[in-house]
Image (cartoon, helix red, strand yellow):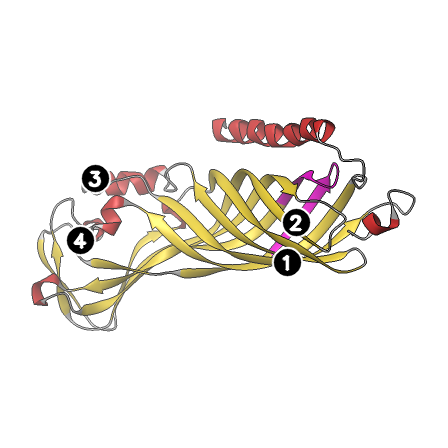
Amino acid sequence: MKRFQFYLLACASVLTAPAALAQQYVRPDASRPSAHFGVTTGLGTTWVIDNNLLEDPNYQYVQTYRRAPIGFTLGYHFNDRNGVQIEANRTMQGTDFQIQEQEQGAPRVGTKNLRLTYWSVPVLFKYTSGAARRTRFEFHIGPQLNFLQAAEDVNRYDRNATLAVRPGDTDLLTVNNRTGGYAVKAGTSEVLGTKADYRSQTFGAAFGLGIEVKIVGPLYASALTRATITAADIRSDSGRARAKDVGYYSPRRSAVVGLQIGLHWQFISPEEGHPKDRSY
């Protein structure tokens, strides 16, 4: 409940701050208030930030890319520069590792896939460089709430091998409580985490910058760089307890940096503004 109260307060701050700015910085040729709606998609580099996981002797981090296949935006411009925007984006997060056998000079044994799927809802203060231009710059920042849809942490083994299992060094202790060598077989897999091991809601921040380009009439396209990060451990109480039981706990966060593109439609009353401002 405290997380939701904090999120609501943060959202209220984002919604009220632009209104004050709008009163202070209004150009003589500023366009009238307007609303806009859009559809987006994206691709990003994703990380799970967990010191123990990144230093695990059995795993080697692999550059990981995940999609944000669909998203929706709804916003309101107080004038041609300041506004607010709320989004709902389906985002794929997590990270991949290569499993390696330490006893044999670290050859590849298999892959570790940590996959998280969220509906991410950022509430953003949005600044743009002006309405009466075909191409304009945009910047936005604000809080984000993530709603977990699916989660899995799976090790898949490609060949027979013996992995190192030492107290506090590896998450394999969560499925095997014996230290020393741990034999794995080709063609098998192990589930080290499920949706129950992760929080159903997490709080974080989002920010981005990019450009908007008028296409025709009220239709315009956007292309921007978007970054997000969670503020606290994304694991549930039970997920943290499992890690603490084997001395393998450190806070786990999720971060994404990627590209988002979209198509948007702007709504302005016909009687408002100069004709050059109505379409953008």
Which tag, 4 or 3, sits closer to the chain's start? Answer: 4
Which tag, 2 or 1, sits closer to the chain's start? Answer: 2
The residue at the point 22 percent across, 49 percent down is: 174
Whole-number angstrom distance, CA of label 2 to CA of label 1: 9 Å
Residue 73 - label:
2
Mark 4 or 2, which is nearer the eye? 2
As displayed, is residue 241 above or below residue 152?
above
Question: Is mark 2 in CB contact (under 8 Å) with mark 1?
Answer: yes
Q: Tell me the crowding category of disc 2: few under 14, some 14 to 19, or many 20 or more residues within 10 angstroms, Cα based.
A: some
Question: Is mark 4 in CB contact (under 8 Å) with mark 1?
Answer: no
Q: Foreground residue, 214 or 151?
A: 214
Q: Position of residue 78 (x, y in %)?
A: 74, 36
Whole-number angstrom distance, CA of label 1 to CA of label 3: 45 Å
Residue position for label 1: 262
Q: Amino acid at mark 1?
A: Gly
Question: Is mark 3 in CB contact (under 8 Å) with mark 2?
Answer: no
